[in-house]
Image (cartoon, helix red, strand yellow):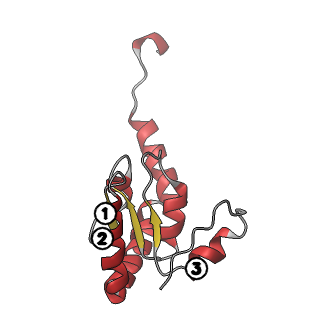
Amino acid sequence: PYITFLGPVDNQKLPAYIEEAELCIYPSHMEAMPLAWIEVLSMGKSFLASNVGPGPEVVTDGVTGRLCDPYSPEDIAQKAIQMLANPEESRKFGQKAREDVLKRFDIKVLVEQNIKFYQSLKKSPAHQ
């Protein structure tokens, strides 16, 4: 195995690179709700993500991928080496991740959740 740092990549070419990768590593210091992460997970790829910000909300450590300390190059390297040394386990993470993303982030699921949320809101006295 070898590591390739791609630098900026055109958005239309990115899925091909993700598909080709054995492991995708996104040790961001901060993300909002990272769509790039969800894209990787939806493709069933082995994924190592940051344990800060939304990391634990998006990735279940040891189930749908692994989480690392983005401030520790040693932790990132250790987790990446473990994942590359255990390809079958990493593939299982990818399979579980795809199932999880389809269950939690499918557009129909998100729309239904939004509808239920708005229906649960009561009008304030000022708006009645």
Instruction: Say whether marks 2 and 3 touch (CB < 8 Å).
Output: no
**Circle 3 crowding by C-alpha within 10 Å: few under 14, some 14–19, many from 20:** some
Quarter assignment of residue 39: bottom right
Dot 1 falls on a residue whose secondary structure is helix
| Closest to the observer, 29 or 78 | 78
Amino acid of disc 3: Glu
Dot 2 falls on a residue whose secondary structure is helix
Where residue 97 appears, as percent x and y from the top left, is: 40, 72
How far, Cα to Cα, is label 2 from label 1? 6 Å
Amino acid of disc 2: Gln
Q: Is residue 68 left or right of residue 42?
A: left
Q: Earlier in the sequence, mark 2 or mark 3?
A: 3
How far, Cα to Cα, is label 2 from label 3? 23 Å
Name of the residue lying farthest toward the top? 126
Amino acid of disc 1: Glu
**Badge number at residue 19:** 3
Where residue 53 appears, as percent x and y from the top left, is: 37, 46
Q: Residue at x 45, y 66 (%)?
A: 25
Instruction: Say whether marks 2 and 1 touch (CB < 8 Å).
Output: yes
Q: Residue at x 37, y 87 (%)?
A: 87
**Residue that badge 2 annotates:** 78
Q: Earlier in the sequence, mark 3 or mark 1?
A: 3
Q: Residue at x 29, y 72 (%)?
A: 63
